[in-house]
Image: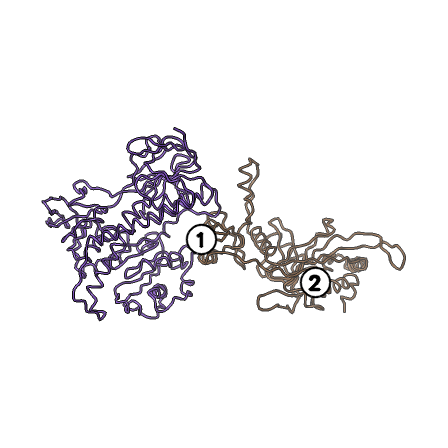
Amino acid sequence: MPEQKFDLIVIGGGPGGYVAAIRAAQLGMNTALVESTHLGGICLNWGCIPTKALLRCSEINHLLNNASEFGFTIKEFFFDFKKIIERSRGVAKQLAGGVQHLLKKNKVTVIDGYGKLAGQGKVTVEKDGKTIDTLSAPHIIIATGARARELPGLEADGKLVWSYKEAMVPETMPKSLLVVGSGAIGIEFASFYHNMGAKVTVIEVMDRILPVEDEEISKFAHKQFKKQGLTIHTGAKVTKLEKGKDNVTAHIDIDGKAEKITVDRVIVAVGITGNVEDIGLDKMPKIKVDRGHIIVNEWSQTGESGVYAIGDVAGPPWLAHKASHEGVICVEKIAGKNDIHPLETSNIPGCTYCTPQIASVGLTEKAAIEKGHKVKVGRFPFMANGKAIALGEPEGMVKTVFDAKTGELLGAHMVGAEVTELIQGYGIAKTLETTEIELMHTIFPHPTLSEMMHESVLDAYGRAIHF
Amino acid sequence: MSQPATEPRLFASPLARRIAAEKGVDLSAIKGSGPHGRIVKIDIEGAKAGAAPVIAPSKAATQASSGPDAAQMSNALGMTYTEIPNNNIRKIVATRLLEAKQTVPHFYLTIECRIDSLMAARKGINDKANGEYKLSVNDFIIKACANALNTYPAANTSWTEDAILQYEHADISVAVATPNGLITPIVKEAENKGLRQISEEVKDLAGRAREGKLKPEEFQGGTFTVSNLGMFGIKEFGAIINPPQSCILAVGAGEQKPFVDGGEIKIGTFMTCTLSVDHRSVDGAVGAEYLQILKQYIETPVSMLV
């Protein structure tokens, strides 16, 4: 079999891999991308994108249910759950086609098959258990992503106990649901199914939901969910799942108290683990793996020269935009570009698409104090913002954390309508290293939700105008 | 005539500027690692980790130059050396003069003065002094500089953003080499002092400067500097301005040489003086006119009696 030679081989076509491949092609590298399942990866096919399509439907449902607040009388309406799922799949499919087009346009060689490291500078491609191709390149990027973490006794079976994947394509709408884990994935599904009318219970082992978010934001969201009718147990864990014919009885330990709850379905969202198995790492002893993730340095380099790992397989935060950005930095470093800096983790925004939405960037107030910063904290409530009230979305807040000495924006934390579209404003501010002065001098348009971002900064310095 | 230089725009993030100001780091000496060389926070933090920035008594400190680091280079190439720690004077000289060279638009004017009359006057006065005092050539030059500034105060100035400050008195800083480095004690209001007083003051100040016993007010301030390397046989040189002053006079050695006078070749003693000038506050013609007046006082020392 002739060996195909490239400048760069990328294994995995998710948001890390395909972006790295396109950037490499832009920089003049002859690039191959090996993908076994579908271009766009989990994000596009089973994650970010299809869930947003689902959440859009749940928002519409929510609006229709509350139409009278806006002066509408809707006597009766129905939703077709099957059509909602179909729409979500359609959106994913459309975008996956887009990725294919982009790779072609940039002259990336896409190879359909399962890529595996096969020694220094070599990758084999398998299809249906047979080796169909051997590729070689001086640089190889592993971008194989991650999958749902499984806990013993809580393994997804695809029928009664779901992982994110089954939760996205159910045949019928469950009437009751138990969500195990209250990170971004768990909370998004909890919020979606709740908005669609299911009775949802959330179990979180930590003492608060959304444990990576600022404590104040977690608390605020918790209160909102409770008000909406979700049941949330923190400091709780599932000890046993008893499966019935079309339901599951979960044994729960809540702060040492045993309880039982019977639900139609269970969604397990207890974190993710990197896809490090069966990709040929056994042939590369210098590549080290720690708790399901490949260990890399600040330039995504593994212990083996010429082999890199980006995105979920290289560790948290497990975010598509982190993977893409790592891919770009990694490739630019390989190409010897100037002016590149390692990824600044405190500049990576995170978004959770529940109702209300949650978005943040940088350090939480607590983390900032723990790092030794003397902080100035600003807060501004949605209730005091004209646009929020006009939208009928008066629940939410914008919180900012500054270093008291230097005025550095250390972190920003938001909860409320459309905050996922707002957070990049603070992302730019952080990347440009602005201080509170430039943010105060920035003119925010009226009337917008973004005015709250201004007011929160002003509030940190005791200067808020509208609160 | 040279034009004042416009400062190139310095690209630095707002946060980098804030931290630099707090730490007293001069941004102009820092190499930025951000996009298009923009100075970002990490560059300032790096400045702290490296050689500690020097704090001058008056102004913010300047980082070491952004060129290759001598220690790094020497170590890399295996060159051997002895480390002589920088004392305070060395650090201040480095900071102040780096700042002067980088931020003050210098230009230079050179003039030759015949000093036969000055030498004769000096000999006459010293002969009559019975050893009570002994004037040096430099004492005459200090006096001449002060009188010329008094006559022509446009050269006795400092540049500020809002205004040019024109001083009422000629406080002459005199460059003195000490074992610890260069220091410039001041003969204050030299235009009002006689040669003998100037001579005695310089002697006292220089002596105490060498022992490190000057009081701060004796070397801080000054409106004009005289630096004389004539005693080392240096013919002429250009000095670096001592900010915030506008001018410094670099004085070379007196030497005999032939010259033409009324169609005849004669022998005279000549001395070359070079004035370094801050173009922001003193234009070329102004500097030149000042030198003309100075030359008059030096060549006709008796006019200093007037």
Residue B137, by quadrant, is: bottom right
Closer-to-camera residue (A361/A355) = A355
Residue B196, by quadrant, is: bottom right
Report which colour depicts chain A: purple
Report which colour depicts chain B: brown
Query: Which residue extends farthest top?
Result: A1
Instruction: Specify whether A430 is left or right of A270.
Output: right
In the picture, the quarter occupied by the N terminus of chain A is: top left
The image shows residue A259 at horizontal and vertical percentages of 10, 50
The image shows residue A69 at horizontal and vertical percentages of 21, 69
Residue at (31%, 47%) from the top-left corner?
A: A318
Marks 2/1: CA distance?
Answer: 41 Å
Indicate the amino acid at tag 2.
Answer: Gly
Q: Which residue is mark 2?
A: B284
Q: Chain of mark 2?
A: B
Q: SS of the residue at dot 1?
A: helix
Closer-to-camera residue (A86/B41) = A86
Work out whether A156 lies above or below B165.
Answer: above
Indicate the amino acid at tag 1.
Answer: Lys
In the picture, the quarter occupied by the C terminus of chain A is: bottom left
Whether residue B201 is visible to the viewer of this picture, yes or no, is no
Q: SS of the residue at dot 2?
A: helix
Instruction: Specify whether B254 is left or right of B66.
Output: right
- Badge 2 crowding class, 10 Å Cα cut-off, few under 14, some 14 to 19, many 20 or more, is some
Q: Chain of mark 1?
A: B
The image shows residue A436 at horizontal and vertical percentages of 40, 62
Q: Which residue is mark 1?
A: B41
Residue at (12%, 47%) from the top-left corner?
A: A250
